[in-house]
Image (cartoon, rainbow, N blue to C red):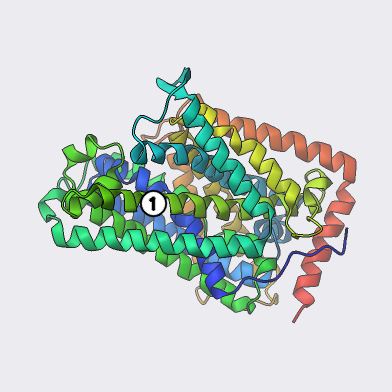
């Protein structure tokens, strides 16, 4: 068991496809209209610039730490080295919620997109949640898709990365067509109002951005499977973030140039309708955009299975979760039991219907920002605690960048709190946070009691020492 190793096979293109594909996902297709109607076209762009700036600063701290400690379940080791075992569990458990939220989001998004390709396919009424009717065929599409993606991840990182590269190419082609078409057929007047509902509108969109950008930190999760120089890991992480910021802003501009606010309000899938209108009302072009969106669903889905399963794997190897979750498949060298756990948790998501999309975005977003805050804190602490630690991708800004990341992460966290215009919705979104926190507390206490605190600390210290002594 101790001799099992993850396969070290990912190159430059694989890493970029993994991170960019995970970040882009389906959100740009299904929620771009919401961003614009809530904040206005320029308000939405401003929200993504602010959110993107946060991710760049956080990403820079990740880049240095990932190059210094390239271990599967990266956040677990950064926060352990800086703040100890409890902090490392909190950080990694928060990241796992963020990843599981994205995977569950995609399981709900897939049946949603089918409504555009196959109108009225949803039938077989089951029940109603938050005013939305849940139908059998709608749920079935999400469940089948979830099982398929779990199988892809189960069968190895080589197969997974090949699929990711193909899907990312499909997404990029669809996005380029949308931006090109809207630039030629669009009208700047359609972008008005530039701002909607002032700062409140911007904040509502801003709290969605962490969820839209999450994916760059799949790179440190898969660090032990990357076959590149350590410095390159940090460079590719930052490059993928810049690509994602550019992508989201281009999509907002493309949609707002083509569709008026009233057209967005009456559209069930704004980005696809914008594509169709940009090409003279062509339903086929709208369907091409939707195919790109499906590519985004699948790429994000696959990417976060990689990230989530590696984080769970690392927690289990450290004895902070049941040890069986840290086993690798004898043939595929994947953490197959961790993958199956994510599959069980997220295959249930379509049963909660389309309202679950927003719940998952907001609850998962808070968990991610909490984890980013902890990583930024770890970065600052390690600069003081381990100044001589090898840092192949060393930031010139030093702890200043870390403190900026801390302040911005904390500021975004506040936006989720009760009393803010963008506060999490009670009871749905807070229940997700509370249940996950309780589940983590129970699993951690049971695991520590079963495997022992000393063995957990011994494993963590041994892994950190091993990686620091490598050339």
**Residue at the image position 37 percent from the left and 47 percent from the top:** 206
Query: Residue 438 occupies which quadrant of the picture?
Result: top right
Residue 84 location, x and y as percent?
74, 54
Residue sitting at 20 percent across and 57 percent down? 182
Task: From the viewer's side, name the closer residue of 310 and 425.
Answer: 310
- Above or below: residue 5 compared with residue 348: below
Q: Residue furthest bottom?
A: 471
- On the question of residue 404 being in view, the answer is no
The quadrant holding residue 48 is bottom left
Q: Quadrant of residue 260?
A: top left
**Quadrant of the drawing holding the N terminus:** bottom right
- For the residue labelled by badge 1, is the local secondary structure a helix, a strand or a loop? helix
Relative to 30, say whether 17 is above or below. below
Query: Which residue appears at 39% of the width and 34% of the height?
Result: 420
Question: 10 Å neighbourhood of mark 1: few (<14), some, or many (≥20)?
Answer: some
Q: In the picture provided, is 419 more to the left or to the right than 441?
A: left
Give the labeled residue for mark 1: 291
Left or right placement of residue 353 versus residue 251 in this view: right
Is residue 317 at all visible to an observer of this figure? yes
Residue nearest the observer in this picture, 200 or 435: 435
Q: Residue at x 25, y 52 (%)?
A: 275
Answer left or right for 41 relative to 460.
left
- Locate residue 70, reporting x and y percent: 68, 68
**Is residue 161 rendered to the left or right of residue 285?**
right
Residue 41 in percent (x, y) is at 23, 49
Q: Position of residue 391 (x, y in %)?
A: 64, 76
Q: Height in image: 222 above or below 143?
A: below
């Amino acid at each position: 068991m101790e001799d099992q190793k993850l396969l070290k096979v990912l190159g430059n293109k694989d890493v970029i496809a993994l991170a960019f594909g995970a970040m882009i996902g389906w959100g740009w297709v299904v929620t771009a209209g919401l961003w614009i109607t809530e904040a206005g076209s320029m308000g939405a762009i401003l929200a993504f610039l602010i959110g993107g700036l946060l991710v760049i600063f956080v990403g820079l701290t990740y880049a240095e730490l990932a190059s210094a400690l390239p271990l599967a379940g990266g956040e677990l080791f950064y926060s352990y080295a800086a703040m100890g075992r409890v902090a490392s569990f909190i950080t990694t458990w928060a990241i796992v919620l963020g990843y599981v939220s994205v995977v569950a989001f995609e399981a709900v998004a897939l049946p949603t997109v089918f409504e555009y390709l196959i109108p009225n396919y949803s039938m077989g009424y089951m029940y109603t949640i938050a005013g939305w009717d849940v139908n059998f065929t709608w749920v079935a599409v999400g469940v089948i898709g979830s099982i398929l993606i779990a199988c892809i991840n189960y069968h190895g990182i080589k197969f997974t990365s090949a699929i990711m590269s193909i899907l990312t190419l499909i997404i990029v082609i669809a996005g380029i067509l949308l931006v090109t078409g809207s630039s030629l057929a669009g009208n700047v007047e359609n972008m008005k109002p530039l701002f909607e509902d002032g700062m409140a509108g911007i904040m509502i969109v801003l709290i969605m951005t962490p969820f839209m950008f999450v994916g760059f930190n799949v790179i440190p999760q898969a660090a032990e499977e990357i076959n590149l120089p350590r410095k390159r890991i940090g460079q590719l992480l930052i490059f993928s973030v810049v690509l994602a910021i550019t992508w989201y802003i281009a999509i907002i501009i493309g949609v707002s140039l083509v569709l008026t606010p009233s057209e967005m309000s009456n559209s069930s899938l704004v980005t696809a309708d914008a594509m169709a209108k940009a090409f003279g009302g062509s339903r086929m072009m709208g369907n091409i955009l939707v195919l790109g969106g499906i590519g985004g669903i699948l790429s994000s889905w696959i990417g976060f299975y990689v990230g989530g399963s590696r984080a769970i794997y690392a927690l289990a190897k450290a004895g902070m979760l049941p040890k069986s979750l840290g086993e690798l498949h004898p043939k595929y060298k994947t953490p197959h039991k961790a993958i199956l756990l994510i599959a069980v948790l997220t295959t249930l998501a379509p049963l909660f219907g389309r309202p679950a999309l927003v719940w998952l975005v907001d609850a998962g977003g808070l968990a991610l920002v909490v984890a980013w805050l902890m990583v930024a804190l770890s970065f600052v602490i390690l600069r003081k605690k381990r100044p001589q630690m090898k840092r192949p991708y060393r930031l010139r800004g030093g702890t200043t960048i870390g403190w900026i990341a801390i302040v911005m992460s904390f500021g975004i966290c506040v936006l989720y709190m009760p009393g803010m215009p963008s506060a999490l919705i009670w009871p749905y979104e807070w229940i997700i946070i509370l249940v996950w926190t309780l589940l983590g507390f129970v699993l951690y206490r049971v695991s520590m009691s079963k495997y022992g605190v000393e063995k957990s600390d011994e494993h963590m210290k041994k892994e950190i020492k091993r990686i620091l002594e490598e050339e």
